Image: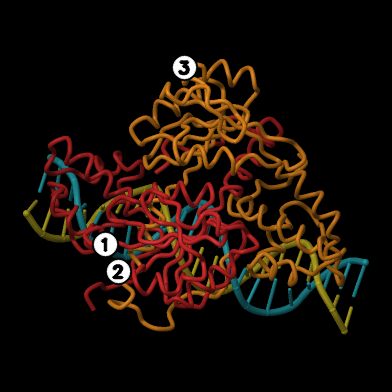
Chain colours: A orange, B red, C cyan, D yellow
Amino acid sequence: MTLPDPVPEATIERLPSYLRALDDLLAHGRSTASSQELADAAGIQPALLRRDLSHFGSLGTRGVGYDLTTLRAELGHHVGTEESWPLVIVGAGNLGSALARQFSRPPFRVVAIVDSDERLHGQRRGGVLVSPQRELGRLVAQTGAVIGVIAVTAEAAQDVCDGLVAAGLHSLLSFAPVGLHVPADVHLRRVDLAQELSVLAYHESHRRTEGHPGDQRPEAVR
Amino acid sequence: MTLPDPVPEATIERLPSYLRALDDLLAHGRSTASSQELADAAGIQPALLRRDLSHFGSLGTRGVGYDLTTLRAELGHHVGTEESWPLVIVGAGNLGSALARQFSRPPFRVVAIVDSDERLHGQRRGGVLVSPQRELGRLVAQTGAVIGVIAVTAEAAQDVCDGLVAAGLHSLLSFAPVGLHVPADVHLRRVDLAQELSVLAYHESHRRTEGHPGDQRPEAVR
DNA sequence: GCGTGTGAACACCTTCACAGCA
DNA sequence: TGCTGTGAAGGTGTTCACACGC
């Protein structure tokens, strides 16, 4: 109705970069910018930025560029930066603890942390109490958490995932190094740190072996 | 020479999943498996797994499947799991500290951690001393680190990145929420935690708004 | 017969290049 | 004239479906 076509996933993934670029330019006192300038700030090609923005309507002015304040508001509205997103983190180990602090800034806030290790219960992580894992359902209902973060071992991950889905969550971010199964209406994203390192190791293994000098990619990465 | 075509990046990114699937099946006492079984274990389509493996030669046997030990050895060789990869981590904050522990398992090992905050110098993170950031070059040379991990603020990231490149590293993993610029022969991968959450927030924002029931994706995620 | 390996079709994403509007 | 918005082309990745070899 409001949007003509379904915004491509690849575009959605770039919106945070665009918001950062907009904030940067606004902080420098700019009020308008061309796709060229915005793309430079975001580290991509101008044509791609224009195509991405076009999915949200005609936000620019031909011959002029984009009004930064208007664009910022429009994109922010779509990403939901105006709202505040309550998170629940499962796992208060090294990673979970770091995430508890990392994720405690607008538009996100950590409203609950649970762990199966009862020695951690009652401790705080970034100001939030660690609760027993069996209270997960009650906590989600009570706090209204809408995004679940899975920071537990590969073995425990599927159970935790099922628990979060059963608690009514539809958006999950997993750091566990396993493929998780979720119902079709649940959005699951994975961050696999070991995988990232492995990809680098792969390329490093092949640097001298098959590294034709000059067949690499362009300079900027997002 | 040895490999006919350049292995697609997407394939390389799936190799860690395949290694995990292989280890799982081997741990269950299996010695052979079909692409169907392997794909199930990795959470993908059989055809995709066959296509991926085909880039490394004819590793299976028609009518039978794949020999798990052989395949494990072959893939491990390509990913470089036989070697041990020394990492240097820049930034000993919440995230850097968690990563120092997270990344201290084969085939990776943390050989150095640096931070610009001198109050952290001399402390330990997962058994490794935190050193002054200005010693980065010397430490890389001394320890032979080949992969650099950037766990600093967005503002400091480009400087740190330049420092790691100047120190001779060609493989970098950045957790800073900015687009970094590197020379063409450097492999840079980014993990943007805020971006992951933002994508979930985007979908959550649109769950009721435009959520046609039934236009979602299949069940497994890798 | 069975399951791999792969040509061909398909889907998605990015880049090019330019028409069209301020 | 200058820059957006976009049709068309190009590229990359995935799925289909079947010929081929064990």
Number of numbered callouts drawn: 3
Report whether mark 2 lies on the same chain as mark 3: yes
Residue for point 34% across, 51% down: B104
Q: Chain of mark 2?
A: A
Choose top left, top right, bottom left or bottom right for residue B110: bottom left
Q: Are marks 3 and 1 in contact (CB under 8 Å)?
A: no
Alpha carbon separation for disc pair 2 and 3: 45 Å
Q: Secondary structure at mark 3?
A: helix
Please give left or right for residue A35 compared with residue A149 in the image: right
Alpha carbon distance from label 1 to label 2? 6 Å
Q: Residue, x 67% and y 53% (percent of image)?
A: A15
- Residue A55 rendering spot, x and y as whole percentages: 71, 53
What's the residue at 70%, 40% (across, down)?
A107
Q: Are marks 2 and 3 in contact (CB under 8 Å)?
A: no
The residue beneath circle 3 is A134
Under mark 1, the amino acid is Gly
